[in-house]
Image (cartoon, rainbow, N blue to C red):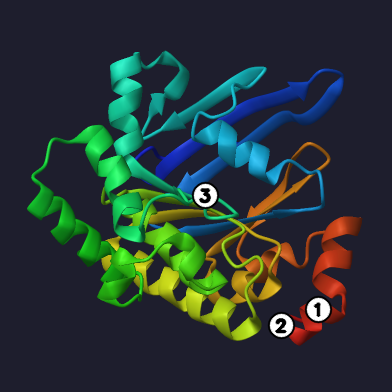
Amino acid sequence: MENTDHTDTIIQVRNLVNNFGDHSVHAGLNLDVKRGEILGVVGGSGAGKSVLLRTIIGLNKPTSGTVAINGRDQASLSQEEARKARREWGVLFQDGALFTSLTVGQNIKVPLREHFHLSDDLLDDIARSKVSMSGLSLDTCCKFPADLSGGMRKRAALARALALDPKILFLDEPTAGLDPIGAAAFDGLIRELTKSLGITVFLVTHDLDTLVRVCDRVAVLGDKKMLTVAPLKDVMKFDHPWIQDYFGGPRARAAGIN
């Protein structure tokens, strides 16, 4: 894959290899994520979508290859540099991964306490701001995850992911488990936040509606590499069996993309 201008590229993955024992997940994968875009990552079951996300954010150490964020190879950073770098992104895992023993407000404060020494009043103000930004009522701050619906838990997890005012937002199957109305509302929120905050979104999904509603470009994982990375209309023309099946079936027609 040809190098792009670093001013336009916020995440650059080169020659990535991820092996787990004898099982190879990625073999020479390359990817550029453009600054300010919403990139949707799709692929078949076991293609390694979540493994790729976890590798980029440093939760998985690759067998070989490099991940650079803002032009800096993440493997070359010192422990303190890596800790500071993590301030620049927020992560929403598929199940939300909220601490069940903490209220929503306390959950939002966790990353803030990890990185900064702030007064309790300021922490409360930030938590309320992020809850409101995520489309939840302020009294949600005092509730526990078990008291929330699935859609509200997703939004609460998003509020925590936004706690540090990230430049990059990583979302792993953000609409999984939501009904169509809830999923559409969440997609709309992501699009709105991206535009208003100027953040970059790396979005792993299987939801065709999300690809249509939200994503600027789509990256398709298959055969242990990126098959294509392009706007949706161009991805649909790509000659590969999985892509044609995925984007040519009844679910795709229901989403209005063919």
The kind of residue tagged 2 is Ala
Q: Which of the two labelled residues, at mark 3 and mark 2, occupies the earlier sequence position?
A: 3
Q: Residue at x 60, y 68 (%)?
A: 175
Q: Position of residue 61 (x, y in %)?
A: 59, 21
The residue nearer to you, when weighing 118 against 245, is 118
Q: Position of residue 145 (x, y in %)?
A: 46, 61
Q: Amino acid at mark 3?
A: Ala
Asked if marks 2 and 1 touch (Cβ < 8 Å), the reply is yes
10 Å neighbourhood of mark 3: few (<14), some, or many (≥20)? some
The residue pinned by badge 3 equals 97
209 with respect to 227 (left or right): left
Task: Label 2: state its secondary structure.
Answer: loop
Q: Nearer the viewer, mark 1 or mark 3?
A: 3
The kind of secondary structure element at disc 1 is: helix
Which residue is depicted at the point 68% across and 33% down? 29
Measured as percent of width and height from the top left, residue 228 is found at 70, 51
Q: Which residue is mark 1?
A: 251
Disc 2/disc 1 C-alpha distance (Å):
6 Å
| Residue receiving disc 2 | 255
